[in-house]
Amino acid sequence: MSVYQPPIQSMRFLVHEVLRAPAILAEAGWDEVSGDLFDDVLSQAGRIAAEVLFPLNRSGDEEGVRVEADGVRMPAGFGDAYRAWREGGWNGLAGDPAYGGQGMPALLDTLVTEMVCGANLAFSIVPGLTQGAIRAIAAHAGDALKDAYLPRMISGDWTGAMALTEPHAGTDLGLLRTRAEPAADGSHRLTGQKMFISSADHDLTDNLVHLVLARLPDAPPGTRGISLFLVPKRLPDGSRNGWAVLSSEQKMGLHASPTCVVSYEGAVGWMVGQPHRGLPAMFTMMNHERLFVGIQGIGVGECAAQSALAYAREREQGRAPDGPRTPGRPADAIIHLPDVRRMVLTARALTDAGRALAAWTALWMDRARHGGDPALAEEAEDWAALLTPVIKAAGTDFGFEAAVLAQQVMGGHGYIRDNGVEQLVRDVRATQIYEGTNGVQALDLVQRKLTLHGGRPVARLFAAIDAAARDLEAEPLTRDIAGPLRDAAERLRGVVAWLAEAGARSPLAPAAAAADTLKLMALVSYGWMWGLMATAAARRPEGYDRAYLDGRIGLARVFANRLLPETVALDLRIRSGHDSLFDPGLTDDLAALDG
Amino acid sequence: MSVYQPPIQSMRFLVHEVLRAPAILAEAGWDEVSGDLFDDVLSQAGRIAAEVLFPLNRSGDEEGVRVEADGVRMPAGFGDAYRAWREGGWNGLAGDPAYGGQGMPALLDTLVTEMVCGANLAFSIVPGLTQGAIRAIAAHAGDALKDAYLPRMISGDWTGAMALTEPHAGTDLGLLRTRAEPAADGSHRLTGQKMFISSADHDLTDNLVHLVLARLPDAPPGTRGISLFLVPKRLPDGSRNGWAVLSSEQKMGLHASPTCVVSYEGAVGWMVGQPHRGLPAMFTMMNHERLFVGIQGIGVGECAAQSALAYAREREQGRAPDGPRTPGRPADAIIHLPDVRRMVLTARALTDAGRALAAWTALWMDRARHGGDPALAEEAEDWAALLTPVIKAAGTDFGFEAAVLAQQVMGGHGYIRDNGVEQLVRDVRATQIYEGTNGVQALDLVQRKLTLHGGRPVARLFAAIDAAARDLEAEPLTRDIAGPLRDAAERLRGVVAWLAEAGARSPLAPAAAAADTLKLMALVSYGWMWGLMATAAARRPEGYDRAYLDGRIGLARVFANRLLPETVALDLRIRSGHDSLFDPGLTDDLAALDG
């Protein structure tokens, strides 16, 4: 069976010992955020996740959503769960106090969000998209729109969604055709059809808001002719706006999350930001969502890792190869079988490092929030820019890997629906695709982020890894972990230089290397996080199980010995270049490949 | 959309140019198997696969099977399709002519089976299990049972299934408890409950046969106390035997294949083979099924690779990084994007090599069938023993990878059910689990097959790779492919030696290295197959598209440059040993891992 326990000890260890967040936040001008507050909020959020959201995960998958004449119906229990979420004040946790939010750090919000995602991925989409819409409105809308919408969205009375994709325009938004005609009152009328809109409609709240990309009549073609509009479900007078959900997709997973085709038929919208500058405004939302989706992957990874371990400790089959561990029982628990340990430890090692990297990034964003220190702000922007594609793609790829491993640990029992782990595989698979496929993230990394500001962000990464490796070397318990981390970082450094040279010769080279480069950077970054965790554990802080701390160092060693070797292969594959993909024998469009 | 075209050109190329099968079969005493016969049978089977079975794949998934009071109902259309299969004589293609079969080579049967699997994985399970049951009965049952059952099973009038798993006994069959009491007439009465029985019941035929593992009253405990019984649905007098399907599992995929819990309540069975020697007899079936399941993975990989390419050539989004390929269109087809090419080519390269390796093995089994040459028979046994776990695990792991890649190429369109590719992911996932999980296959490889006969089978592999590399080097078009293949084979050779040494120190070492060793051996074997294919293509045989032949060499280069580098990482990971998995900090049962 799938299980979900809030990973409170791991989160506390990360906040207090690895990141030393309370002290850093205090330095950065956060007066009111004590360590106790972190612990209290995490405990309360963990209870909601485990007791309210997790029990609805299977039933939501089985029942699914349905489209009725007047809109989308969520599965049983989701309405009550959302009410508990909203009434508990969770929706405004990190929201701007000027609009009724609690102004808590992004770090805390990240960890709370991860628990929601781990307990019920489909549910998480509703508040997750609302948070991104809030950010885009706050950053780009005029005061009237902000005053009208932000308080209700921060409270959770209204939710948010984003409407980008059209049937012929997915990754390539420059092709989109939805039109926005100016009206006399300064609003616009939107006409067109959008698809793949998550949470476009539901019955959790009375109203909700779409952020819609559309073209003004005088728009130039391509991405520089797209504007952004706020299109609510209900107009200020309470009447229904002119759009309708035509259908919700039947999907591999996320059955409890509507994925809608929406027809806008002269729907009233208000422009957010400047004409033709909608895409940069939308990216305020998308950058938030990319971090959120990475956290979705990490949350599912947590549920998968827990489920795999629980099953492996209980299921008795066969004997350890070096002799029985429980001679009085007819068989040993399979956790004693090396190949099962490999799978359980891999799922755990990937998940915890992903959480740490997302938390690192969130803390940097917090450090810049209150401070007038421009150096801090610059560094925070560098980390967020560099790590967003890594957290999105690696968080979801490794979340998928963890779910597949958990299913494999359970054998046939992992394949049947009742046990819940196959749902994790189906659900998390979407996260590798939506919010920019992981291939798009990889291109963002190699084409933009690695070369940003002359390579300043990635230089910060190498400096941070050097410091982490020195700390590992200074402590006998962790000394052996430093070498593999340094070697892997050197490989990445070499690849970054190679990409610059090869890219100067052909733009095909970085694009062909993108996915491998992102994975290389992810493994290096995860190895770095394990370095930080091992160093923190070796200090033997109070307040944690001793076995838990020993386990941190053991997992860091697993990561160094078993996960980092892949960096050698990635390095080789990247340097093999793009020639084989464009081999003349393969023809330009690969037409003769099949036969 | 998922597409399935019979890969006739690729199969013909393999049979005639890569394996030169007709000549080799003639040498081995097969008089009646001409090259034309191969081509005719493949074409006819391809039509059934594409025209009869593939159209039922989506509808079968949507409708699923259901259990009614009198048994299992298959989805609409499956009855007609099975009738076409049976009446076309397909079920007896490779069957023993003494019992009404056509006695065709296993090579031909392998290719026909792959097309069935690629077109409709759920359907393939019915004949696939029947073939294995036929083999076990033919090898181990007495003449009366053989005469009564083989003709009807070879004709397809009756089907077969195997009943091994019990709730507490999956991989560890030694724990099973189903009992068999001798009756006065020489038959037995079976009592117990089995689960995860594929095709335990259906409405395609009037009768079917379970091969059931059970314990005699005097059975010693463990695997040496298990006997094998033939338990039909209908007794010879036409009456219903004493077992019933209690339920069929709700699964992630394979919805059109029943996976049953069966209760045996004094069911009549006849022993197959010797008392307490049921497990070796069952392995006659299981070894066949492991090859079959590997072919299932290859078949799904074929459908996935075709679907990915078809979509990528049609879908227009974005522009090639080095400039527009179709300036007159609003966007280029995504096949011109390097990361999409990477995914499409990887799916294709993995699939075709898998097919070649399965065909190689089948041809060796054929070479031994008619001959009195004991050297050929010995070599055939070596190849089958060594390659069965590789074909099973790599065929299914890479089939899953191909399906996931195809889904990723299609983005959101790959996640919705209508397009059919997400079903491939859900369906093929089972093949990595059933018939011995891929972890079990890996243990079979490292604990038994690599050391079999003093390592004679793996020595044959290295000799064959040497010969293939020499051929590659002798031809300017393929010379560059030889080096990576030799290097990868050397890595495997080093690992085999390392495993022997490390295993002598601790039995944990090979078990910890098992999955990585299997993948290493799979990549080396697949690289070898690409070597054979490239060499055959460089000869420029008549009767193939020139672009197809060029593509073979191009794909071999893709495999050498982009897939073989992983062998470096596997080598390193294997040699890191088992210590990190059993790090003292992790504790014996990993109890403190989560938190």
Image (cartoon, coloured by chain):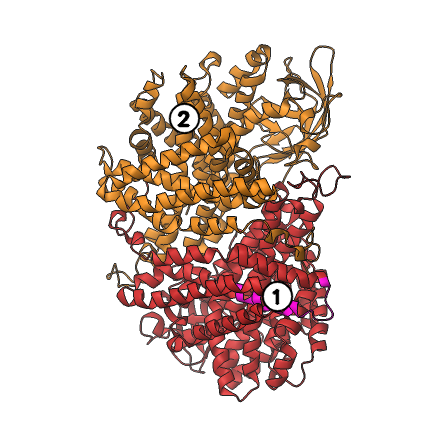
Chain colours: A red, B orange
State the SS at label 2. Answer: helix
Q: Is residue A545 magenta?
A: yes
Amino acid at circle 1: Pro
- Which residue is pictured at 34% across the width and 21% down the height? B25
Q: Where does the image place residue A210, in percent across and percent down from the top left? A: 51, 70
Q: Quadrant of residue A90?
A: bottom right
Amino acid at circle 2: Trp
| Tag 2 residue | B364
Give left or right: position of A506 versus B584: left
| Tag 1 residue | A476
Question: What's the magenta region?
Answer: A526-546
- Which residue is pictured at 23% across the width and 44% down the height? B477
Q: Is residue A208 visible?
A: no
The residue closer to the viewer here, B384 or B417, is B384
Q: Where does the image place residue A437, in percent across and percent down from the top left? A: 45, 60
C-alpha distance separating marks 1 and 2: 56 Å
Compared to residue B19, the image places residue A181 above or below, namely below
Q: Where does the image place residue B331, in percent across and percent down from the top left? A: 30, 61
Compared to residue B398, the image places residue A524 above or below, namely below
